[in-house]
Image (tube, rainbow, N blue to C red):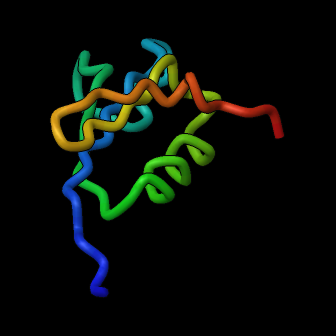
Amino acid sequence: MPELSIPITARFTFKPERAAEFLEGEQIVTQIEVDGVDEVMDYVAQFDDALTDACAIINGQVVNLSDFATEV
């Protein structure tokens, strides 16, 4: 059976003191479209020390990724 592609929006909130490294102006929140939850979690791992929050919007449901964070 072919794998169905479900659009996922990843939304990231950056710490105000770090946001300028990633975003323009006074912006602290951004969102991107991704192919899967694994891709979202890769971004979370990559930018972990600069984030205050991350969530995924899947089929209209908001999933707060801090609920699934683990210590590495």
Front residue of 35 and 4? 4
Front residue of 46 and 11? 11
In the picture provided, is 60 more to the left or to the right than 38? left
Image quadrant of residue 58?
top left
Rendered location of residue 16, percent (x, y)? 43, 12
Rendered location of residue 25, percent (x, y)? 22, 23
- Residue drawn 16% across and 34% down? 60
- Residue drawn 38% across and 59% down? 36
Rendered location of residue 64, percent (x, y)? 43, 24
In the picture provided, is 66 more to the left or to the right than 63? right
In the picture provided, is 68 more to the left or to the right than 36? right
Image quadrant of residue 55?
top left
Q: Quadrant of the N terminus?
A: bottom left
Front residue of 35 and 49? 35
Is 16 above or below relative to 27?
Answer: above
- Residue drawn 60% across and 31% down? 68
